[in-house]
Amino acid sequence: NKETDLKSKLAEMERQQVVFNDKNIKYTILKREVDSNRSQYDSLIAKLNEVGVSSELKTQSAAIVDFASLPTAPYSPRLSINLAVALALFMALAASIIYIIELLNNTFTNPEQIEKELGLTMLGILPLVGDRELIASIADQKSGLSEAYRSLRTSLQFSGAEGAPRSLLVTSSEPSEGKSTTSFKLGQDFAALGARVLLVDGDLRKPNLHRLFGLDNAIGLSNLLTNTVRKDDLPGIFRPTKYPNVTVLTSGTIPPNPADLLSSPKMALILTNLGKRFDLVIIDAPPVVGLSDAPILSRLAEGTLMVVSTNQVTRKSAKTALKRLRSAGANVIGAAMSKFTVNKFDYNYAYKYMNYQYYDYGASTPKIEGKVDDGAGQPAHAKSPAFRRLVRRLRSGVGGFVGRAKSAS
């Protein structure tokens, strides 16, 4: 029985040992958790103490300088500043656009470009006039257009040592640049000085001079060149006009071979004979580019006037036309800039390119060519002795031209 009791106690102790081991393991786990929590707690306490000490050491650095006041107007948007900035940006953008357009524009926009690019003397600037106002402006001797053409006439009178050429060819690079109108007006203006003027329509392809004078074009220059004019009709081929001293020789029947007729010896003979009968022969020629007519005629004239239209003909086209004229032996005495914008037609352009005239376009009483007053109302340089000497030279030149015309008649 004693052995049984001992075995029973041993089994009980072994059971208790297993329970103790389980509890010991749980104790060890819990003890480790306690130690970890205590460590975290101590760390948090230390940090809390540091924050407390740090906050106590900080001093107040801000101070009230002045109390805020309520605004009397909105801070933003500032209308005046915004408008000024917008205006400045708009002007800068507009200037940039204008500059780019000028760079890309390959036409002539001012007289300086013609003188620089073509190397021609600027003899006259003809303002732009609408189609509806053109006839009225031409008829009105006090209009800006009429004044401009008289200035061109004056420049032609002093284009050579002996005055204006006795035979003048008027041409342009391309169609519709104003050469026929220029021929028409120059004929009237030279005739107004007493010269006997003959206007010859040298455009045997698309004639226009007879329309400006309201004449028929049944017979004319082409008929003379082809010997298809009857002897009885010969005197009537030279048409008098309503303008004193102005006679017109129209182009006549349009031939199939204009260039051949114009280059024939008979054309040179006709112009030579006409030069003996008239003080001035003005030939309205076709455009130069694409045709050989104008270069052919330019060899037969004493002088050639090249009409260049503003913002129309390209610089390349004008250079090509001028080169063709000079290659043919033409005496290109200068250029006239047509269709010039009126708002650019100020005193500086007028004085520089029109010898001495002072024009005020839009004024009720423009200055009369050759007339000099006591100097009141004139610009400072218009009162100078050099300016007055130039005026006297113009007067004597005009008088000499009229005298030669009267003696020839």
Image (spheres, rainbow, N blue to C red):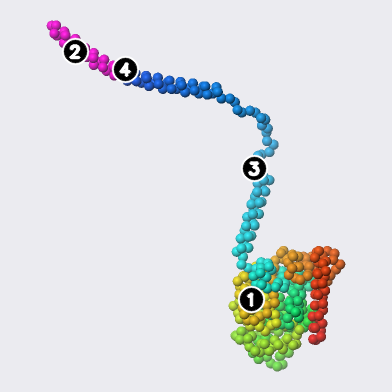
Prevailing secondary structure of the magenta residues: helix
Q: Which residues are magenta?
A: 1-25
Name the image quarter holding residue 97: bottom right
- Mark 1 residue element: helix
Residue 16 lies, in percent from the top left, at 23, 13
Residue 219 visible somewhere in the drawing:
no
CA gap between label 3 and label 1 equals 60 Å
State the SS at label 3.
Answer: loop
Residue labelled with disc 3: 77
Q: Position of residue 268 (x, y in %)?
A: 67, 87
Mark number displayed over residue 322: 1
**Residue wearing tag 4:** 27
Q: Name the residue at 76% across, 73% down.
A: 151
Label 4: state its secondary structure.
helix
Contact flag, marks 1 and 4 (Cβ < 8 Å): no
Q: Earlier in the sequence, mark 1 or mark 4?
A: 4
**Looking at the image, do the residues carrying marks 3 and 4 touch, with CB atoms under 8 Å apart?**
no
Q: Can you say whether 177 is above or below 78 in the image? A: below
The residue that appears at 23% across and 16% down in the rendered structure is 18
Can see residue 273? yes
The type of residue carrying mark 4 is Tyr
Name the residue carrying label 2. 11
**In the rendered structure, which amino acid carries the disc numbered 3?**
Pro
For the residue carrying disc 4, how many other residues have a C-alpha within 10 Å: few (<14), some (14-19), or many (20+)? few
